Image (cartoon, rainbow, N blue to C red):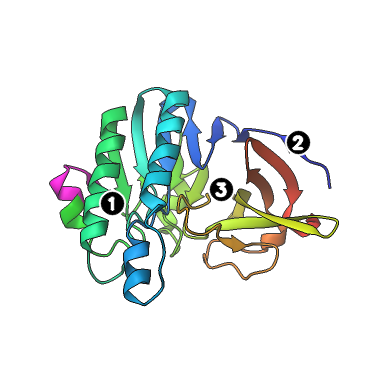
Amino acid sequence: MSIEKKTEISSGIEIIDLAIWIPKEKLLAITDLQLGAEELLNNEGFFVPRTNFDEIKKIIEKIFEKTGKTKTAIINGDLKHEFGKISEQEWREAVQIIELLKKNSEKVILVKGNHDSIIGPVAQSRGVEVIDEFLSESKVLFVHGHKEPEKESVKNAKTIIIGHEHPCVSIRDGIKSEKYKCFLKGKYQKKTLIVMPSMNQLSLGSDVTKEQTMSPLINKAGEFEVFAVEDEIYYMGKVKEL
């Protein structure tokens, strides 16, 4: 297995920390923040410190230090965590994240994820558009990834970018094993498919070298290339080689 530092995941598409950055369009995308998860866990009897929001906010602020003000900021699904309602914590934190993005972007777009069934009131209160998918000027299609996109949308896209999967990888060095959030790059219906890691800081995600994938867009996960996120971005080769 060879490892190299690499920030460009596809032509014209870069990785900055846990975000996708398209410099030509000044477009930034993040996904799977799942704000409010601590409140749900606490209600179920599991004590979890409420740190997710603060850690995500710090990451986003550092990303904007690198990009400067963007033209478009996309939340590619699952801004909140609970399915059937909006908790007080979710509402408060979602509003603050949206305002942070609005402060640093000309336009904020929320792509609807499977956890976002009733995200409308929050988005409307901040004047943010909620849509099922977004096709950028350079034909990059953003969908959450919990269901297959419309055939016409795929036809019009050159690249598809999803979240939902929360990918991470285990890297073993002798007896020591470490997990890292990662981006994946593969194919879906002959189009380049990029899978983003979650912004959620409570969990590293699902290990793609050991666990079954969730998204219906991912076939033959072993053929996907891995870009691990640590202090820098490290290209690890294909999943099946790890």
* Residue drawn where x is 22% and y is 63% of the image: 86
Cα–Cα gap, marks 2 and 1? 37 Å
C-alpha gap between disc 2 and disc 3: 19 Å
**In the drawing, does residue 164 fall left or right of residue 174?**
left
Amino acid carrying mark 3 in the image: Ile
Q: Is residue 188 magenta?
A: no
Residue 50: x and y in percent read: 37, 56
Point out the frontmost of discs 2 and 1.
2
Disc 3 crowd, CA 10 A, few/some/many (<14, 14-19, 20+): many
The crowding category of the residue bearing disc 1, from other C-alpha atoms within 10 Å (few below 14, some 14 to 19, many at least 20), is some
Residue 173 x/y as whole percent: 82, 53
Residue that numbered label 2 is attached to = 4
Three-letter residue code for mark 2? Glu
The image quadrant of residue 229 is: top right
When the figure is inspected, residue 154 is found, relative to residue 137, above or below; the finding is below
Q: Is residue 127 magenta?
A: yes
Per the rendered image, the range of residues in magenta is: 123-131
Looking at the rendered image, the quarter that the C terminus falls into is bottom right
Q: Residue at x 63, y 42 (%)?
A: 230
Q: CA distance from mark 3 to mark 1?
A: 20 Å
Q: Nearer the viewer, residue 163 or 122?
A: 122
Q: Compare marks 3 and 1 and give the one earlier in the sequence.
A: 1
Of marks 2 and 3, which one's residue comes earlier in the chain? 2
Dot 2, how many residues are within 10 Å of its Cα: few (below 14), some (14-19), or many (20+)? few
Q: Is residue 167 left or right of residue 178?
A: left
Labels 3 & 1 near each other (Cβ < 8 A): no
Q: Residue at x 28, y 38 (%)?
A: 108
Which residue does the numbered mark 3 point to in the structure image? Answer: 194
Residue at the spot of label 1: 131
Q: Between residue 16 and residue 58, name the one nearer to us.
A: 58
